[in-house]
Image: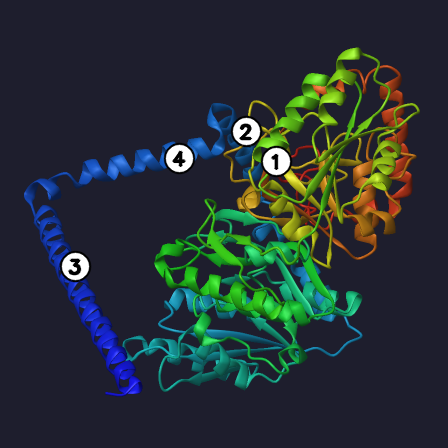
Amino acid sequence: MSDDNKTTDIKIEELEKELDEQRYQNLQLATRLSEALALAEDKQRQIDRIKNSTAWKMSKPLRVCMHWAIRQKNRVKNLGGPRGIARKLKSKSIEKKARAQHGTASFPNAEEAAAQRARKFDKDVTFSILVPLYNTPKDFLKDTIDAVIAQTYEKWELCLADGSDDAHAYVGEYCREAAAKDSRIRYKKLEKNEGISGNTNECLKMATGNFIGLYDHDDILHPAALYYYMEAICDEDADYIYCDETTFHGNSVDNMITLHFKPDYSPDNLRANNYICHFSVFKRSLLEGTELFRSQFDGSQDHDMILRLTTAAEHIVHIPRILYYWRSHKGSVAADISAKEYAIDAAKGAVADHLRKCGYDNFRIESTRAFETIFRIHYPLLRSAKVSILIPNCEQKDVLKRCIDSIIEKTTYNDYEIIVIENNSRSPEIFAYYDELKSHPKIRVIEYKGEFNYSKVNNFGAKQATGDYLLLLNNDTEVITLNWLEELLMYAERDDVGAVGAKLYYPDKTIQHAGIVLKLGAHRTAGHSHYRVNYENLGYMGRLCYAQNVSAVTGACLMVKKSLYEEAGGLDEDFRVALNDVDFCLKLREKGYLNIWTPFCELYHYESASRGTDLSGPGAERYESECEHFRSKWKEVLDKGDPYYNVNFSLDRSDYSLRIDNAG
């Protein structure tokens, strides 16, 4: 036998052995699967026996009570205990008084309505309002159509596409009657129900207007909704418009459940949460090259559409008025998202599709504790970059040690350096500690000579930094989150992002920082939102549970590209003690960058430990002087208000309480 034949025989024997081994493994796998299936079937039989038993049926009231008690316990926990409950009750009391301003009391009276109808605008706009119908209750249908007919801006058309079944023939009958009375109403009976996306797309085929509005078949519009939208189109050249909204129940919009006052356009908020929702109206030309609703995202088709069209829009305008009333009833998403569980997967799919189109890969999207469709997005780090952590320090050895120990012990990101900026210490103890730090390969101690000026100290440190990114960090902080640098860096490395800030807690686990709001507080300069709220609180509309755009973040923990720090001129050294971080963030915002706050980077901030007498005596005078300088420097910006904080909120409280005196 030749060597070639022997080699062939050996290979055949090896293949046969491999096949035998594979068959054996497959047999084992089949056996395990069969056993698992039998076990699952047995478990299901046991569950069925229990659920069909008399004891199970008799215990239903007890189980309902138990589940209710668990839900209440979780609610109390999320509010932050008794103090949080008291805060919530006070907020609810204020909200109850404010509601009267935003329901039927906000509707124009006869004189105002006549003036709105008579106004001549300098643009010719026809609104095509699209309403997909499916087995709509007759009283809901009447309210929905009547609200459009009542609009004080009268150049509109109502496009109704009806997928109702034969048992709900009254839907078609009512719509035909309405269309016979008003030529602006267009009705089409569909051969079959195509779902929300398909039915709405059929509405679009009927539309002739140059602006498209999306309206649900069981909701209600404010009588002046189109009028205010027309103002935005003419005055601000808006091509995408949305408003504030409320859910209501029963037969009156005054039976409000939740009032949702929204920020101006915030792309990071929108990725995490479809806060825009209703009432979306947009220029028809934005649909060129794309679809309106895509059926694969049914249940969250509006989130998909909003992400696509706002990305394409040039002038997105938010009208801070409640102009949309979202009816809550059995089976509606407004009542319970679990009524449409597929909406959760559809929302994740819509966000994923958007992120891929924006050039992101390998991200993860998960629901948060706030709500199933409020998301945490894990972005991948795009590149390896060095982070320089700048920590100013004067004396306070124990405070500094706690901060640095937490960084070294808990940081999972490897490429970083710590630069301690010594300023005017005298004690032998702190210099002995500095000598210890100098032996660490990632730590440098440099000395800034001169009187304390927070801005100068950090600018000096930034010049010594070798990293691609700077992290301004107070010495009285302590890291909680292991991947804290990654959580900041995933945003800071984006080309459209300026500063990124963290969620900071006082030692008692109440919130010290969750983003900064312009004009909030007694000095009307800037203040921290959700200040002193318990760490388990979800925040207004879940705002404490997802990354979002803000006007500014605190310099106690602020990450920014070193190149951007230099481009913005660093911290303004006229602000020696206060507001230098807010001023810096506004400089970045002025250059077109987004500032982001993330709740997924958490630190303790022992603020009182370093504050001392900074704001008493001469310190108080200096603080007031810097507040005055800030108000003067940013007067135009402050006069416009914070775009991420609705004008309907009070500037006297940090917990998103409503303004009582605001008429909208």
Tell me where residue 360 sits by quadrant.
bottom right
Circles 1, 2 touching at the beta carbon (< 8 Å): yes
Query: Nearer the N terminus, badge 3 or badge 1?
Result: 3
Depth check, mark 2 against mark 3: the one in front is 3
Near mark 3 (Cα within 10 A), the count class, few <14, some 14-19 or many ≥20, is: few
Depth check, mark 3 against mark 1: the one in front is 3
Q: Position of residue 163 (x, y in %)?
A: 38, 79
> What residue type is disc 4 on?
Asn
- Could you tell me how far apart the alpha carbons at marks 1 and 2 are, in whole angstroms? 9 Å
Circles 2, 3 touching at the beta carbon (< 8 Å): no
Provide the residue designation for mark 4: 74
Left-right relation of 45 to 164:
left
Near mark 4 (Cα within 10 A), the count class, few <14, some 14-19 or many ≥20, is: few
Query: Nearer the N terminus, badge 4 or badge 2?
Result: 4
> What residue type is disc 1 on?
Asp
In the structure shown, which secondary structural element does the residue marked by tag 1 occupy?
A: loop
Left-right relation of 182 to 449:
left
Depth check, mark 4 against mark 2: the one in front is 4
> What residue type is disc 2 on?
Arg
- Could you tell me how far apart the alpha carbons at marks 4 and 2 are, in whole angstroms? 17 Å
In the structure shown, which secondary structural element does the residue marked by tag 2 occupy?
A: helix
Provide the residue designation for mark 3: 32
> What residue type is disc 3 on?
Arg
